[in-house]
Image: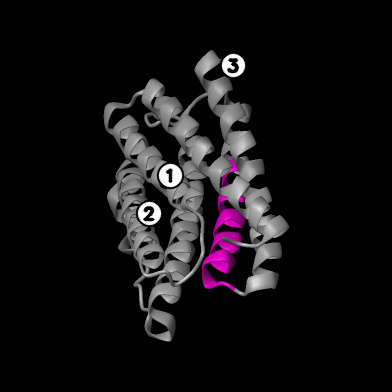
Amino acid sequence: MPTVALLAFALNFVSGLVALLTSYYAYRSNRLVDSSVLRAISVGFMLLGVGLLADAGTELFTGHLVVESYADRVFVLYATFTYLTIQMVAYLVIALGYARAAYGGQARLAAPAALVGSAAIGLFGYTLLSYFVALVLLGFVVFQGLLLRSGEKNRFSGMVMLAFVLLLTAHLVFLGSVLALSEGLLLVGIGVQFLGFLSLLMFVVRSEVVGPG
């Protein structure tokens, strides 16, 4: 297995475990404070964790990264299609949680168009579109998070905003890695994503111990 693919597998595997731990601790914290944001993070990161572990398994099975495989590795492409769809749904759930926290029962957020008719644009186009949709959703989450903090509608830590800014940055790098078919950029994006997951895990663990704030 090439060194870059091995590093990507290791980071994705650990990130998947961190995402599942984040989901678990967010669920436990939500039982104490009943927050739409924590509820959405719990569901969203459960999906992200499962998707990342499956993606890591694909890399381990094939020994190749996604950007090496567009031309002739059908299995990797379809596995990637599945992961990217799960990822978009996960971030949509989190964005809806922030929308509900900001606007209550009046929140409405349409499902991303990338989930409809994706076969027509091909898997490469779907990959580009999925990262773009993830960027839009993460941008929405960051924006709403800043509004919630400035309005003092909750006591969520700045570490949450740091986590989502890191995830937003990671997806910018992911988009660039697909456009450039760059292994190096993909690895950087995976590393930044891991830091984002780790920051959010630290917050929800702290919240479960001392309460959100």
Mark 3 or mark 2: name the one nearer the start of the chain: 3
113 relative to 14, above or below: below
Q: Tell me whether circle 2 and circle 1 mark residues in contact (CB < 8 Å).
A: yes
Q: Amino acid at mark 1?
A: Leu
Quadrant in the picture for the C terminus: bottom right
Residue 204 location (% of width, % of height): 62, 54
**Residue 69 visible in this rendered orientation of the protein:** no
Q: Amino acid at mark 3?
A: Met
- Report the mark closest to the observer, 1 or 3: 1
Q: Was residue 165 drawn as part of the magenta stretch in this picture?
A: no
- The residue closer to the viewer here, 207 or 172, is 207
Q: Which residue is at 63% across, 29% downward?
A: 61
Say which residue label 1 marks: 167
Q: Which residue is at 56% across, 22% downward?
A: 7
Mark 1 or mark 3: name the one nearer the start of the chain: 3
Q: CA distance from mark 1 to mark 3?
A: 27 Å
Say which residue label 2 marks: 138
Residue 70 location (% of width, % of height): 38, 32
- The residue closer to the viewer here, 140 or 119, is 140
Q: Is residue 62 left or right of residue 69?
A: right
Secondary structure at numbered mark 1: helix
Q: Magenta residues, as a range?
A: 35-52
Secondary structure at numbered mark 2: helix
Mark 2 or mark 1: name the one nearer the start of the chain: 2
Q: Characterize the magenta stretch by its predominant secondary structure.
A: helix
Residue projecting furthest to the bottom: 105
Say which residue label 3 marks: 1
